Amino acid sequence: MYQDFKLVEGRPAYVQVKEYLKRMIMKSVLQPHQKLPSTRELSELMSVSRNTIISAYLGLEEEGLVYTVKGKGSYIAQITASAAAPSWRLDWQERMNEQARMAEAMDLMKHGIRAERGTISFTSIAPNEKLFDLGNVKRAFLDRMSVEGEVLLNYGYAKGYKPLIDLLKQYMEQKGVDLAGKDLLITNGFTEGLDLVLSSLTKRSGAVICENPTHHTAIKNLRLHGYEITGIGMERDGIDLEQLEQALRRQSFDCAYLVPSYHNPTGIVMSPEKRLELMKLLTRYQVPVIEDGFNEELRYSGSHVSPLIAAVGQGNGVIYLGSFSKVLFPGLRVGWVLADQELIYYLESLKRARSIHTSTLDQSILYQYLLNGNLDKYLRKARTEYKRKYEWTKQCCEAYLPYNRLTGDGGLHLFVSFSEGADTRQLLEICKQRGVIFTPGDIFHTDGTGQHTMRLGFSRVSDEDIEAGIRIIGEAAREMFTQT
């Protein structure tokens, strides 16, 4: 006994000893009123210092698991066991509702592509952690903790951390947004913001309109909320307005979900002219817009394009969902909803009921990081690196892939369309055997199409692997398409 104990690096030794003895007590290996070895004896048996054993015994005594008899030593306490409840097992599979089953079926982390070690993976569009500005993040954390550490570790407000709310309002105002009659709510990233908005809207038609293809996470959430999705095709400068108007004439929609900048997955940036025409059209048909501000900051060329919410002035028909997840640090789960102040009033209550509040610590770190003026410096570095990788990936695609269409104006990915009839899922299976994976494009389509498309995320792939991986995809594509 005791000699099977193994010390693990990285945790205090006394905690490990205490937990080891506690497990033995709870499993009844050590019986009530059984005398424990002396601290000197146990330290030799477990190959740790005597002080470590003394601290472990004290910890067990504080928990009521050990008692001390003066002059005699330490003993195992009598633990009051709760009465045994009847043993029964539920079949939870039978009790899952349709929403849970649908969420599981659409869960790409469970049912997506699994990469073997050494595989070149183009599936991620997360930022490259090697670019993270760790020094300034640490500084922001220490700065904020020194000012109000006790407050930050307590409960926060459902609406959000006020200094960050005010700073984000200024940030949005600099994008050309008229803040009159609008307010802002902090959320746990983009996904919670979308979920809150969809949870708050009355279903009149039960239908929503969006680009086709579109963000897979949005498709999941829209379907989980019971919406029928009508997808509108994409042109080189954004959504097809003629097709959109035809759909608006045919039926009514509760809202439109749109990604105008660095559209996921096509990477297209909607032109300023089309944005204006789009908003005129949706205003005419009284369709509110949920605007996903995805990757807005990662523009490599051309002038700044204002978000849709800026185009409506003091109008209140656009709900803007913002996040720095793809630009800064996705580990800080901070996003925001900017919308009409009456809508935010209700979303605040819904947020309070669902998650109480977003981590005040995360919000305060982001606030201090922005306040210290780090965003612009970090963006300059990130844009330079991602632009270089974007151009290299594009060059490799042009050299090796037999594509029909290649889109992506910046951001962290490119979208590839092969000839109609091509099947990128079959292509994926061949490439997977050769050590390369990508995201097949059908998951982004609202109508079961897109089998001839794929998304290539390059942000976390080395230059060498970008070229090697795209060359392998190209070779497999030529082989497969020649056979068909």
Image (tube, rainbow, N blue to C red):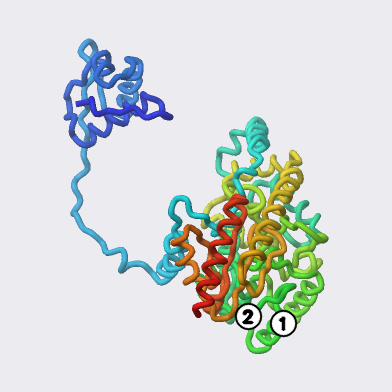
The quarter of the displayed image where residue 39 is located: top left
Left/right placement of residue 451 relative to residue 13 reads right
Helix or strand or loop: what does disc 1 sit on? loop
- If the image is split into quadrants, where does the N terminus sit? top left
**Residue at figure coordinates x 68%, y 61% from the top left:** 395
Residue matched to label 2 = 253
Measuring from the top left, give residue 20's x and y in whole percent.
Answer: 29, 30
Of pointers 2 and 1, the one earlier in the residue sequence: 2
Kind of residue sitting beneath label 1? Tyr
Residue 5 at x, y = what percent? 27, 28
Residue that numbered label 1 is attached to: 285
Q: Residue drawn at (75%, 81%), measured in percent from left and top?
A: 284
Count numbered badges in the picture: 2
Q: Amino acid at mark 2?
A: Phe
Q: Quadrant of residue 374?
A: top right
Residue at (65%, 79%) from the top-left corner?
233
